[in-house]
Image: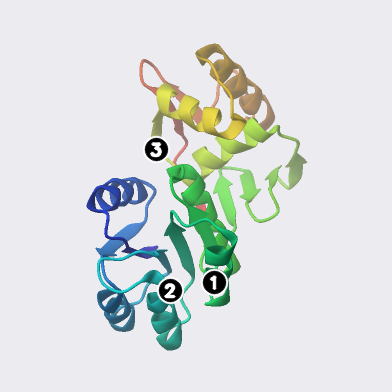
């Protein structure tokens, strides 16, 4: 996915660009209104992340100018979270509005939601015989629905979204902690992996969909991706 990031805070640009690239987004960053409109006119982007306060001009005018030439989904990123600012952004055609400071994973989730609504993202992921319909929030194995807890579903979604990627225990704990909103310990992670395997693996004692990489973490089977 091609993302245009319009932001004049260089530290935020560098941090967010690195994070989004790890999430498989390709990011182009500019810091002014005119440059943002010109960039959107010249190149195809799937989504625009747009700050309200820019080095030159403002995000509202940039949004108006971009929407006049291309129908590109826009998410405003701004410290102005008052009702007037939110309504103004939405009235200009923005698809979502997220206030600073924000959690990067929450932003990515909101980005994916906007992309799905715009028809720019696939909604079904596969991990071996397991499919995950991220629009409906339904997981199935060989056509039969799996009944997962919220954290089990989050784990499955991570592995299905990144086939073949190795996740350290620390990375997984961070994901679960964000999802639960409370502390999730190392032993708890082991329990959730065990329970998820019992629901998705042919033989949970000999897992092939989610493998343990000794001393490192867990890795999905690598046969997944979008449908």
Residue 14 percent location from the top left of the image: 25, 49
Residue at image position (34%, 45%) is 19
Tell us which disc is closer to us: 3 or 2: 2
* 2 vs 33: above or below: above
Q: Observer-nearest residue: 201 or 87?
A: 87
Q: Which residue is mark 3?
A: 165
Q: Secondary structure at mark 2?
A: helix
Residue at image position (53%, 33%) is 178
On the picture, is 95 further left or further right than 196? left
Q: Do the residues under discs 1 and 3 have CB atoms within 8 angstroms?
A: no
Residue 177 percent location from the top left of the image: 53, 27
On the picture, is 140 further left or further right than 33? right
Task: State how far apart marks 1 and 3 are (Cα).
Answer: 41 Å
* 175 vs 17: above or below: above
Q: Please report whichever mark, 1 or 2, sits nearer to the chain's N-terminal start.
A: 2
* Label of residue 208 in the image: none
Task: State how far apart marks 1 and 2 are (Cα).
Answer: 8 Å
Residue 73 percent location from the top left of the image: 49, 71
Residue 20 percent location from the top left of the image: 36, 50
On the picture, is 125 further left or further right than 22? right
Task: State how far apart marks 3 and 2 are (Cα).
Answer: 39 Å
Q: Which residue is mark 2?
A: 60
Q: Please report whichever mark, 3 or 2, sits nearer to the chain's N-terminal start.
A: 2
Q: Observer-nearest residue: 212 or 91?
A: 91
Point out the residue furthest to the top here: 187
Is residue 119 in view?
no
How was this image coloured? rainbow
Q: Which image quarter: residue 164?
A: top left
Residue at image position (28%, 77%) is 39
Q: Do the residues under discs 1 and 2 have CB atoms within 8 angstroms?
A: yes
Q: Which residue is mark 1?
A: 88
């Amino acid at each position: 996915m091609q993302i245009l990031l319009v932001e004049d805070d260089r530290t935020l640009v560098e941090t967010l660009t690195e994070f989004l690239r790890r999430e498989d987004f390709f990011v182009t960053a500019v810091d002014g209104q005119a440059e943002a409109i010109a960039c959107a006119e010249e190149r195809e982007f799937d989504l625009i992340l747009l700050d309200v306060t820019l080095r030159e001009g403002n995000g509202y005018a940039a949004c108006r100018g971009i929407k006049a030439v291309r129908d590109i989904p826009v998410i405003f990123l701004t410290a102005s979270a008052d009702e007037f600012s939110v309504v103004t952004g939405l009235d200009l055609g923005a698809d979502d509005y997220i206030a600073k400071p924000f959690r990067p994973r929450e932003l990515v989730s909101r980005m994916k939601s906007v992309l799905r609504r715009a028809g720019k993202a696939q909604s079904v992921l596969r991990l071996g015989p397991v499919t995950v319909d991220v629009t409906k929030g339904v997981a199935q194995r060989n056509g039969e629905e799996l009944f997962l807890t919220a954290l089990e579903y989050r784990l499955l979604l991570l592995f299905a979204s990144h086939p073949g990627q190795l996740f350290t225990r620390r990375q997984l704990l961070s994901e679960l902690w964000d999802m639960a909103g409370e502390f999730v310990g190392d032993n708890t992670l082991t329990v959730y992996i065990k329970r998820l395997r019992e629901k998705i693996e042919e033989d949970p004692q000999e897992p092939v969909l989610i493998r343990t990489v000794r001393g490192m973490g867990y890795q999905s089977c690598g046969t997944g991706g979008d449908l």
